[in-house]
Image (spheres, grey):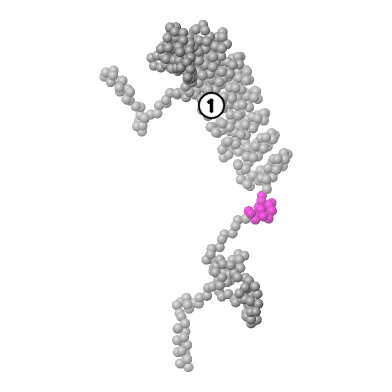
Amino acid sequence: MRPTEEITLSREYIARDPRTGLPIAVAKPRKSVKKAKVETGPWVALSDDDVFSMLRGQTDSASVRWKDETISLGLKYAIRALGRFHGVRVHQAHTFLLASLESDEAETRIAALEVLPEVAVLKSDELFDWLSVMLDDPDVNVRKAASRCLTLTSPIFPSGVSSILSNELRSPVRYRMDAAWAGLSGLCDTWPEVVVDHVDSLLLEEDMQLRKKATALLKKIVNKGDSAVWDLISWSLNDAEVEVRRVAAKNLPALARKESRMATLFAERALGDSDSDVRMSAIKAIQVLDTDNGRARDLVVRGTTSKDLKVRSACVELLPRLFGEEVLRVMAEELLATETDEKLIASLKEMVFDASLDGTEAQKNAQLAPAAPVPALDREIAEAHGHRVGLEPVRSTETPVGSKENTDSPDKNPLKGSDAPATESTTTPTAAPVYRAVSQDEMMGYDDDFEDEDADDDADYF
């Protein structure tokens, strides 16, 4: 087989599962979400020839039109334009950038550091070594420019700046440390596993502020990391400094949404902490947890007898979500025997109160279920037999079902005048039943004709 054929076959080969025949999933390399920020300025108006002629020293400046004005740009602007070169010309840009970093002019070195992230995306050879050198440059402005460059490159090149970032995070110089921490924070969005490594080492530092700031970063990666993040939270909860434990406990609600089992274990530990803020963070995590979890219910019940008033109040508020009315009433009665806070006593009394037993007459009646409505047919049959349905009076046959009966007295009848005859009856006739009882003969089919014929035969006989 010729080499070309072998290459063709290897490219067409697809690994498949022998049982299903489907392609086997292959993990793709992780790609950075962020890209180097490309800034714009007057240098974008420079032509490529003007840029390279100034970098070679053939010309000192070039005139361009920028914002309706004609301005003259020098060497530093030509250096800033190096970030736009791609393909083959990026090698030239990289060479000129290295030369600019070695310049004796501070302004030139600053311009080179500003464009370094853009060029490093395409070719980064030796650039981060120079970045490390520039962080200790004799000129303070160059050092500040190098710190800004570190902030921009950290989220994109974690391996290239790993050692640099580790040193700058512990720098005694404030602006250098702040720039490094800003870069590490940006790294949480792109490479959280690298942040875990940095936080792991920072939690071993004696400086409490470093441990506190490192623990605060866990909140940004708790939903992106794995068991390594859980270990870091666990270690922070055991820190000797209360401020570190407070920051660590604030990660528990977010962890409860991600991994409820681990959050329950950490919340149980935090509830026993000596600091009130740590305990309250544990309660917030329990509120997020599934209330059907038996361990979480036990934590809430245990918290109702805590010495901390905030913890007791929060746990008492959770009781109606966890238990039914009967169980809740019994628990509230037991807690009332030992509770001293007035607000909590009022809340517990509301849980104990039963409207069906201790309420007013109106409250008791409201608890009663309404009677089922009587069907219309049953109502008519009952009224036909003269029985009352509910509290309604028996309707007469002259009054249709659903109509209002005429209950006015004869004296008030507008149709009768004052000169009506005295012999006129004022009594209301008795209403005849709507339904007539049926005899057995009628049910059997006998009628009155048979009875009349028998009667005539008997008369003739006698």
Identify the image quadrant of residue 446. Answer: bottom left
Q: Is residue 361 magenta?
A: yes
Residue lying at 65% horizontally and 23% vertically, measured from the top left: 241
Seen in the picture, residue 363 relative to 74 is either above or below; the reply is below
Which element type, helix, strand or loop, lies under badge 1? helix
Residue ID for mark 1: 221
Q: Quadrant of the N terminus?
A: top left
* Quadrant of the rendered image containing residue 351: top right
- Residue 305 % position (x, y): 68, 37
- Give, as a single range, the part of the protein colored magenta: 354-367
Provide residue 18's location: percent of width, then percent of height: 35, 30
By secondary structure, the bulk of the magenta-drawn segment is best described as helix
Image x and y of residue 348, in percent: 68, 43
Residue appearing at x 73%, y 39% in the figure: 340
**Residue at point 49%, 7% (across, down):** 102
Q: Nearer the viewer, residue 320 or 104?
A: 104
Q: Please count the marks in the image.
A: 1
Residue type at tag 1: Ile
Of residue 4 and residue 34, the one placed in the foreground of this image is 34
Is residue 341 in view? yes
Q: Is residue 242 magenta?
A: no
Q: Is residue 126 above or below residue 16?
A: above
Instruction: Tell whether 158 sits left or right of 236.
Output: left
Q: Nearer the viewer, residue 406 or 272?
A: 406
Q: Name the residue at 60% across, 57% down.
A: 370
